[in-house]
Image: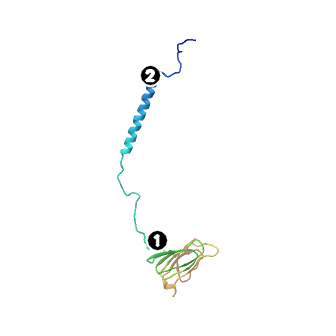
C-alpha cells in the first residue's frame, strides 16, 4: 500500500474546516444581532384589550321589557320576586314563579312536558309585569311580550 492519498478522496481539508467555521460564526453573529434587535423593540403602552365599565341591572334586561329594572333575581324551582322592577331569570327546567309589580320575567323552561308556571302581581292585567316565556306557557297576570322556542 502506498502512503499517498488517492485523488478524489472525501476527507476534510483544513480550508474546508476554516470555511465551515466561518459560516457558523456568521450565523451566530446574525442570530445575536436579531436577538438584540427584538429585545430592544418597544411597544407603546395602550388600553387596547382593556375596557372598564359599570353594568347595571337595566343593562341586562332584554329589549322586549320596557320598564326600568333596578335589581336581578334568578334561580330554579320556586322563584319569588323580592322587589318591584326586578329582572327575574328562570332556569332551563320548569319553574314556579311569583312576580311583584313591574317585573320582567325571562323563562328558560322546557318547550314540552311540564312548563314554567308564572303568576304576576294582583290586581290584574295593569300590574306592569312582562314575560318572555317558552311557547305554550300562558302566564297569569303577566303580559307576554315575547315567546321563545
Indicate which disc, 1 or 2, sits on the residue closer to the N terminus.
Answer: 2
Q: In front: 120, or 31?
A: 31
Residue placed at 43% from the left, 30% from the top? Answer: 23
Q: Position of residue 60 (x, y in %)?
A: 46, 71
Establish if 126 lies above or below 52: below
Identify the residue shown where x is 46% and y is 25%.
17
Is the residue 131 above or below the residue 4 in the image?
A: below
Label 2 packing within 10 angstroms: few (<14), some (14-19), many (20+): few
Residue 105 in percent (x, y) is at 52, 76
The answer, for residue 33, to whether it is visible in the render is yes
Q: To which residue does mark 1 refer?
A: 60
Which image quarter is the C terminus in?
bottom right
Looking at the rendered image, the quarter that the N terminus falls into is top right
Residue 98 sits in quarter: bottom right
Tag 1–tag 2 contact (CB < 8 Å)? no
Separation of residues labelled 1 and 2 (CA atoms): 77 Å
Q: Nearer the viewer, residue 6 or 4?
A: 4
Q: Tell me how many marks there are.
A: 2
SS for tag 1?
A: helix
Residue 93 is drawn in which quadrant? bottom right
Q: Position of residue 107 (x, y in %)?
A: 55, 74
| Residue highlighted by disc 2 | 15
Check disc 1: other Cα within 10 Å, few if <14, some if 14-19, many if 20+. few
Q: Residue furthest top?
A: 2
Q: Helix or strand or loop: what does disc 2 sit on?
A: helix
Instruction: State the image quarter where residue 38 is shown.
Output: top left
In the displayed structure, does residue 137 sit left or right of residue 51?
A: right
Amino acid at each position: 500500500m502506498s502512503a499517498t492519498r488517492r485523488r478524489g478522496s472525501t476527507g476534510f481539508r483544513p480550508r474546508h474546516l476554516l470555511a465551515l467555521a466561518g459560516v457558523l460564526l456568521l450565523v451566530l453573529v446574525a442570530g445575536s444581532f436579531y436577538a438584540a434587535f427584538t429585545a430592544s423593540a418597544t411597544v407603546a403602552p395602550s388600553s387596547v384589550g382593556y375596557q372598564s365599565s359599570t353594568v347595571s341591572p337595566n343593562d341586562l334586561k332584554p329589549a322586549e321589557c320596557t320598564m326600568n329594572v333596578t335589581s336581578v333575581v334568578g334561580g330554579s324551582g320556586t322563584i319569588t320576586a323580592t322587589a318591584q322592577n326586578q329582572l327575574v331569570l328562570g332556569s332551563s327546567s320548569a319553574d314556579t314563579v311569583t312576580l311583584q309589580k313591574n317585573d320582567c320575567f325571562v323563562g328558560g323552561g322546557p318547550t314540552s312536558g311540564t312548563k314554567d308556571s308564572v303568576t304576576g302581581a294582583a290586581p290584574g292585567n295593569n300590574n306592569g309585569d312582562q314575560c318572555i316565556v317558552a311557547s305554550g306557557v300562558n302566564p297569569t297576570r303577566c303580559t307576554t311580550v315575547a315567546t321563545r322556542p
